[in-house]
Amino acid sequence: RNQPVVLALWVARAVFDSSLQQAVPARYVAGAYESREAWAAALERSEVRVQWDPDFPPSGPKLARKAIQLGLRGEAARRLAAEGITGVADITPFARQQSEFRGAPDMLFTPAQDVYPVRDRQLAARLGLDKSVPG
């Protein structure tokens, strides 16, 4: 609702991973930085911010898991647009058709979702992704 256009984007892994490397959490996470001041300075300098939002299924209340949201600006945003996007599809008609089935999950087609494999342990811990890193 209230989204006039829905686009599906394909993003090159190298560019996405580079964005993650630059990302700074939007909220202070104890232990991820030397101090709150160091985090604040990193956040101010960073062109990529990461925050965790509630994740909602199509049919209702929020799930226990969170959804990552990346905010890009400056060169990071330009690089993603120029080098990172490898495909775009307007899926607005499909999304509108599927919205009719929110109350009938057996009829609903949704994108496959999986944990994104971040192999850098320090990065995963800094961004709150450490549960996705194999032990």
Image (spheres, helix red, strand yellow):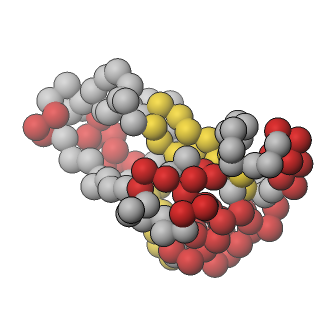
Q: Position of residue 63 (x, y in %)?
A: 35, 29
Q: Quadrant of residue 52?
A: top right
Does any portion of residue 9 appear in the rendered image? yes
The residue at the point 63 percent across, 78 percent down is 83
In the rendered picture of this protein, how many numbered marks are placed on residues? 0
Q: Quadrant of the C terminus?
A: bottom left
| Along the viewing direction, whichever of 39 and 9 lies nearer the viewer | 39
The residue at the point 80 percent across, 67 percent down is 75
Q: Is residue 13 above or below residue 62?
A: below
Q: Is residue 23 above or below residue 99?
A: below
Q: Is residue 73 above or below residue 11?
A: above
- Residue 123 left/right relative to 32: left
The residue at the point 72 percent across, 51 percent down is 24
Does any portion of residue 116 appear in the rendered image? no
- Residue 83 left/right relative to 10: right
| Along the viewing direction, whichever of 2 and 117 lies nearer the viewer | 117
Q: Position of residue 21 (x, y in %)?
A: 66, 65
Q: Quadrant of residue 121?
A: bottom right
Q: Position of residue 5 (x, y in %)?
A: 49, 46
